[in-house]
Amino acid sequence: MKKSLMNPLVLVLACGMAGPVLAATDPAELDKAVASLAAYEDGKDFAGLRAIEALLRSEPKGSPALRDLEGRLASLISGEATREGKSEACKFLCVIGGEASLPALEKVLLDETLSEVACLALSHYPPAADKALREALPRAKGRAALAIAGVMGDRRDPGAVGALAALAKGGDASGADAAAMALGKIGTPDAAAALAELRASQEPPRLPTLMGSLRCAGQLAASGKTSEADALCEQLGKAAYAAHVRRGAFLMRCRLTGGKPAALILALLKSGPEDLKGAALAEVAKIQDRAELDTVLAAMPGMPSGEQALLVAALARMKADWVRPTVLQAAKSQDGGLRLAAIAALARVGDEGCVPALVGALAKAEDARERNAAVLALRDVPGNGSGKAILAAAEKADAKEKAELIGVLADRGVAEAVPLMQAACQSPEPALRRAALRGFAFLSGTETFPALIDMLLARAGDPSAGDFERAIVILADKIEPPSARTDLLIKTWDARPDATTRAALARVLGALATDPALEKLKQALGEGDAAVRDAAIRALIAWPDARAVPAVEGIARDGAEDKYRVLALRGLTEMLRKDLGRLAKILGEVLAKSPSAPVAKESLAALAQIPHPIAIRTAATKLADPALKDDAVVAILTAAERCKPEGLPSVKAQLEAASKVAEESLRPRFQGLLDKIR
């Protein structure tokens, strides 16, 4: 209630609407403004509202002018005025009201159309308003009763407990709910007793009653009545109550222990409900007392493995020195779930002394999940010496574990591992070789670039060459300026004319995408060896930007083999995404040369992606070709549906022609486009 009414009020007072500034000493002007307010209806004359708002902004709190205005607004509320006018007057009194206007607000408390806004005003009134609210509640009905109960709770009036208890027993569910929430906000021992009676009278207790009781416990605790709050929370732990209520009550009891919740936690774990045990174990992470924690840890061996796993997850958020031995021991458990939780926890609370256990867990992992957990823990385990400990383990590991550990060393940035990685680059084991090449490329300096190229040359033509090519691309990215990244590769190209070497170098040059690389690949299009031409063509087609467009365009127009022309058209579609006009022009020129069916179909498919009339007109040139008619129809339809409506009239003839030869199932879509034109 309060929020929904307060927002308009804040807007009224803070928006600074332009309007006449009311002269505080001019009673006639004030009379005029109040009279305008009395006749106010939503969305109509704002003059009175604006004038009063201006006065509120200009006058200090408690000034004679505002006291005078308070009296006039009270008279308006008590007298003849529109409902909207009285409502706005109540909002103003929320800011300036006091005991002088209290009688006027009392009169509208029972009016269901005004009770909520009157209660909003009274929420800021001095203590004298409490008596008025208590007297009004027994006579209020419906929304008025709910509003009064709500403001009683907001004001935390201890004297309202009796009236609220009576409302709660009145038989109306909404009234009982409002009373329960208000009693919870008041939070006195009497309010707690009233809520206990209410819980006993409801079977089962309604959720607002339980939530009000939980809030009451919080208020009791805040006022120093910890024993009463604990007793109330204990009552709220009944199995029949909603889980979130019981959880909230238990957590509050933990906070009431003064930082010593171990006994409470262990008692719940021993005989409490299953659905609260996770919350109880999570609460362990908040313990700040070493002795309390030790009490919990001493009980850990007797817990079921599932609970031990939850406890370990909580320990991961605590001081590492306190919990590390326990977590390390759990990492050696025979239970998979507990072991997995402990391995994950060591990523936060472990140190270099835990590395052997994590390496052992990696070697003995029973499934991919545990293996991944061990790798992640090794990657993140704290400690300045952890990297060296992992390196020592990697040097002794077999190929499978060495590959994983080299990956960890690369992720941790352990530069001392570069020699190990360089040696492993020659491994016949693919996984180890790839991990070593990746790590070597990431961690080594540019001075190792020639050595890496030599490794590639030694493997050129081998299925493993791709691993070395990718590593070269990673390492070359460190060379500055970027234009120099391919200098050594081009020198190697010139010095090594064999096709196998040049094909491998062509792939790397394409990935590095420098201007010298582009020129070298364009020259390679004239190479006599098919493998070199193939690698050069594919590198150009995959070029990451438009610098290669002229070369790729030449392949698309004049390539000797259809497979390369088709690939070139696909490459152009990617390169010219931001220059669709140029792409459409190239595609039109390719189609105009009556290419083979695969090239023509690829050209039409590319035209379909261009939402422009020129693409539609170009595709329409193939409607008369029986072998390409269907592809042309689809291209025209797809492009037209993506085209802006204002572009369709210029291609009406092409749409009509395509509709005539289209399959029956496509004609309704053409008709829809033609209808837009008409």
Image (cartoon, helix red, strand yellow):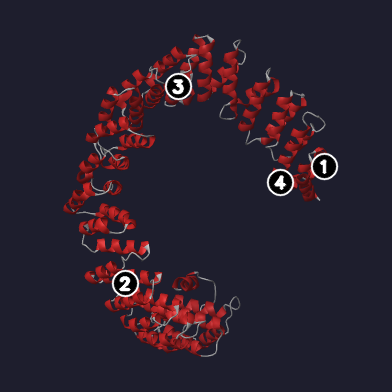
Q: Amino acid at mark 3?
A: Asp
Please report contact status of discs 2 and 1: CB closer than 8 Å, yes or no.
no
**Front of the two marks 2 and 3:** 2
Where disc 3 sits, the SS reads: helix
Q: Amino acid at mark 4?
A: Lys
- Say whether residue 385 is left or right of residue 123: left
Identify whether 379 is placed above or below 397: below
The numbered dot on residue 656 is 1
Q: In the rendered structure, which disc, 4 or 3, sits on the residue that comes first in sequence? A: 3
Q: How much space separates mark 2 and mark 4, taking CA atoms?
A: 63 Å
Kindly identify which residue carries mark 3.
467
Q: How much space separates mark 2 and mark 1, taking CA atoms?
A: 76 Å
Q: Amino acid at mark 1?
A: Glu
The numbered dot on residue 230 is none
Kindly identify which residue carries mark 4.
644
Q: How much space separates mark 2 and mark 3, taking CA atoms?
A: 67 Å
Q: Residue at x 79, y 35 (%)?
A: 620
